[in-house]
Image: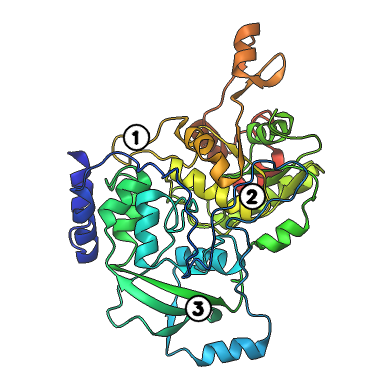
Amino acid sequence: RPFLQLFRLWKTTMKYTAAALSLLFASATAFAPASQVSRSVATSGVWGVQSAPVVTTALSMAKQVPHGGTLVDLMLKTDEEKEAAIAKCTQTLQLTPRQLCDVELITNGGFSPLEGFMDEATYKHVVENMELPNGLIFGLPVVFDTDDEDLQPGMTVLLKDGDRDIAVMEFTDKYTPDKPLECLKCYGTSQIEHPGSLMVATERGKYYMGGKLTGLNKPIRDFECATPEEVRAGLPDDKHVVAFQCRNPVHRAHYELFTRALDAEEVGEGGIVLVHPTCGPTQADDIPGAVRYKTYEVLKEETKDPRVNWAYLPYSMHMAGPREAIQHMMIRKNFGCTHFIIGRDMAGSKSSVTGDDFYGAYEAQDIARANAERLGVTPVPSLNLVYTEEEGYVTADVAEEKGLSLKKLSGTKFRQMLRAGEDIPEWFAFKSVVQVLRENA
């Protein structure tokens, strides 16, 4: 098969070969259905002490409850506390970009109720059941990977980003993950044609380690990522908050989509949008996070819409389709959102060999609706908008019913025009966004 040829390119690298072999020969279909049973089990560990899952069905006129009931905050506040925590460390580790995002979201509460990286029991339960051992729904495992044979349970290490002290981690266990099963359950396939499976096979280390985190300092980034507590402080207590997730620059159709979502029947009067792009690692061919951030900032200034709030999320994409939709809804719940816009083929990906989609267009919407009550977040399906010469942006159904003339511009053609310095039609993209993309090409 064609992807075996791709695999052979890594044959010279022992780590890549071993990882890819284990993934390639696993079965390549099916998601594990999430258990529909909520268990009232109080359990302690890297995801804290939690009772039965909090299910919020009446979200109107109330700020969102954090996932699990309490917003985690693991950040130390004083220099004395930080110095004492660092003094306990026996080793220093540099974080990868993906690990850095995960550490930040654990310590600031974005991954509430987690208080550290998942131990083996929690990892297995999330992989198999899409929930924590206490029954609380959780989309994807959050793991600390390593190839270091010397790291052992019981050790306390200092996690750094360059020269900056980020967190202290107390290792509780070390285990060899079942990577083929992880990919099969979480991504729906274990083939390395999928970017998530490829990441697990070739980027992640041989071992995973569980352990509790203590936060020291936020990473210094080109873009400021507000914490859940900070974002919540700027949101109204008495209105619905609709989250819009993206990993690409926002163009006209996106803007129309998330502003019109406020008119959806699921959203109460006076609701606002939180545009919350992910600015961490994504697919190899995506626009870098720092550049995406610049496009968002100029668009925020150009539009100045009081109904639209902006914040940035230090999250690394898995391109896991349906299960990543659950992860995104859970995270935005912790940031105070009551609703979440689910687009077509959200967090979807294509085979690097055949170009075929790994997920159906509406799989993410289906799993979001099926688990909305357990999550306590209301999904808002995105409108299928098209641009017409006569009426501007309308839904595809309206355009067909009225026989309107459509105008189209593919993403590929847009990138070609951008590189060639050609004029980009304003119905497709904002001038300010185009300028940033050209300046950073």
Q: How crowded is the residue under tag 2: few (<14 C-alpha within 10 Å), some, or many (20+)?
A: many
Earlier sequence position, callout 3 versus callout 1: 3
Separation (CA) of disc 3 from disc 2: 26 Å
The residue labelled by disc 3 is 160
Q: State the SS at label 3.
A: strand
The residue labelled by disc 2 is 276
The residue labelled by disc 1 is 355
**Whether residue 167 is situated above or below residue 425 in the rendered picture:** below
View extreme (front): residue: 40
Earlier sequence position, callout 2 versus callout 1: 2
Separation (CA) of disc 2 from disc 1: 28 Å
Q: State the SS at label 2.
A: loop
Closer to the camera in the image, 333 or 291: 333
Which quadrant: the N terminus?
Answer: top left
- Residue 5's x, y, as percent? 19, 46
Earlier sequence position, callout 3 versus callout 2: 3
- Residue 84's x, y, as percent? 58, 91
Q: Is residue 102 left or right of residue 19?
A: right
Q: Is residue 36 left or right of residue 330?
A: left
- Residue 167's x, y, as percent? 53, 78
Q: How crowded is the residue under tag 3: few (<14 C-alpha within 10 Å), some, or many (20+)?
A: many
Q: Nearer the viewer, mark 2 or mark 1?
A: 2
**Whether residue 260 is situated above or below residue 438 in the rendered picture:** above
Q: How crowded is the residue under tag 1: few (<14 C-alpha within 10 Å), some, or many (20+)?
A: few
Question: From this viewpoint, is residue 389 visible?
Answer: yes
Q: Is residue 395 left or right of residue 233?
A: left
Q: Nearer the viewer, mark 3 or mark 1?
A: 3
Q: Is residue 320 left or right of residue 270?
A: left
**Whether residue 320 is situated above or below residue 144 in the rendered picture:** above
